[in-house]
Amino acid sequence: MDFTDTNKKTIQVYEENIDKFVDKTASTCNNMPREWIDLALKMMPVNQKILELGSATGRDAVYIKDLGYDIRCTDIVDGFLKILKERGLSPDKLNAITDDIGGSYGMVLANCVFLHFNNEELHSVLKKTHETLTSRGVLACSFMLGQGEMWRNHKVAGRYFHLWQPEEIMAVLRQHGFKTEYMRAGDLPSYADKFYIIATKIPTEKSV
């Protein structure tokens, strides 16, 4: 199976199937993702900004913004950027793999984003994420449970997914200076193929 240019191809699939994806995606932040986000927000250093990678429809960002947090929305898909603007979220166009993330944040949120990255891309983005987080900053990210990689036809056809086991991701996060504080595998039918992580940036001696 051909796994070249996976990110480019996945972005194109989103661009060509925005309406279909929106129709098949939950419109409100609830259930497991909401519990996960709430816990991550409680762990985040106070009075700091949040960066969301891959904001998509803005569902999670709207929920977080309505709680009073300052969140920067980003996406690489033009169709999603249009939706985010319509929801009053002032998004930035950003490809986390190829672009400089910039800024300084108390939390980075990546819900159903890192699961589209191959191994090399994930390591690169985790390095950038670690650099952009403040001391003891929080990373909230979700992954697809399994092994290997695949082109998947769920919701819309032709998106790339890299599958992981929780212990594999915990080891990768540790390698990039993160301590896993929370892991929950999908124990509800709609989330059975995913797991959710909250990790904190391990402070260096200078920042302790």
Image (cartoon, grey):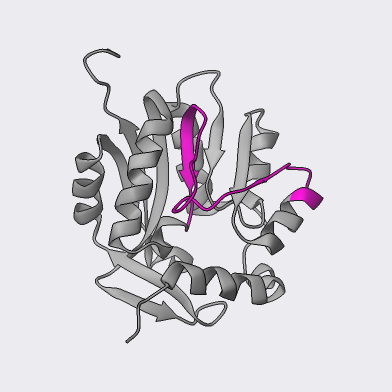
- Residue in front for this viewpoint, 80 or 155: 80
Rendered location of residue 131, percent (x, y): 37, 32
Quarter of the image where the C terminus is located: top left
Which residue is at a point 37% across and 58% down the rendered structure image? 143
Q: Is residue 197 visible?
A: no
Please check the rendered image and state whether residue 103 is part of the magenta-colored stretch, yes or no. Answer: yes
Rendered location of residue 186, percent (x, y): 38, 60
Residue 151 higher or lower than 167, as above or below = below
Which residue is at a point 28% across and 61% down the rendered structure image? 119
Q: How many marks?
A: 0
Quarter of the image where the N terminus is located: bottom left
Residue 3 higher or lower than 121, as above or below = below
Q: Is residue 148 visible?
A: yes
Rendered location of residue 138, percent (x, y): 40, 33
Q: Which residues are magenta?
A: 85-112
Quadrant hosting residue 187: bottom left
Q: Is residue 39 left or right of residue 30?
A: left
